[in-house]
């Protein structure tokens, strides 16, 4: 599947959830989790962009996006520290 199509479908689903709202709590919980994972991916993108000069690179995949999205800035800092010192 093309990345543009995937981003458009995910964006449309998020927009639909925001406009209509999810009346069922599990769907709302799932939607909030997906939004947090997307925000985590954005955090990692900015970390990779700004950390490029310092030699910091964290791959953007589901696991790292979930850690960054659920833990926030401390999760991004932990991933950067793991990537810088351990790997």
Image (cartoon, rainbow, N blue to C red):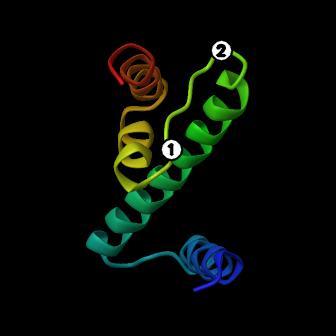
Q: Is residue 47 left or right of residue 60?
A: right
Q: Is residue 10 above or below residue 46?
A: below
Label 1 to label 2: alpha-carbon separation: 21 Å
At a point 59% along the width and 70% down the height, the residue shown is 18
Q: Which mark is residue 69?
A: none
Circle 1 crowding by C-alpha within 10 Å: few under 14, some 14–19, many from 20: many
| Quarter that holds the N terminus | bottom right
How far from the left and from the top, in percent, is residue 51?
65, 22
Q: How many marks?
A: 2
Circle 2 crowding by C-alpha within 10 Å: few under 14, some 14–19, many from 20: few
Q: Is residue 28 left or right of residue 54?
A: left
Q: Nearer the viewer, residue 14 or 87?
A: 87
Q: Is residue 60 above or below residue 87?
A: below
| Quarter that holds the C terminus | top left
How far from the left and from the top, in percent, is residue 4?
71, 77
At a point 38% along the width and 13% down the height, the residue shown is 85
How far from the left and from the top, in percent, is residue 50?
71, 25
At a point 57% along the width and 81% down the height, the residue shown is 20
Q: Is residue 35 left or right of residue 42?
A: left
Quadrant position of residue 13 = bottom right
Q: Are marks 1 and 2 in contact (CB under 8 Å)?
A: no
Q: Secondary structure at mark 1?
A: helix
How far from the left and from the top, in percent, is residue 58?
50, 35
Q: Which mark is residue 54?
A: 2
Write down the residue under mark 1.
40
Q: Nearer the viewer, residue 31 or 63?
A: 63
């Amino acid at each position: 599947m093309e990345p543009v199509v995937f981003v458009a479908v995910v964006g449309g689903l998020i927009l639909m959830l925001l406009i209509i709202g999810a009346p069922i709590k599990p769907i709302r919980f799932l939607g909030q989790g997906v939004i947090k994972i997307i925000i985590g991916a954005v955090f990692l993108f900015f970390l990779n962009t700004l950390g490029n000069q310092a030699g910091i690179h964290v791959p953007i995949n589901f696991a790292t996006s979930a850690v960054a999205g659920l833990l926030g800035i401390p999760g991004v800092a932990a991933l950067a520290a793991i990537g810088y010192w351990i790997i």
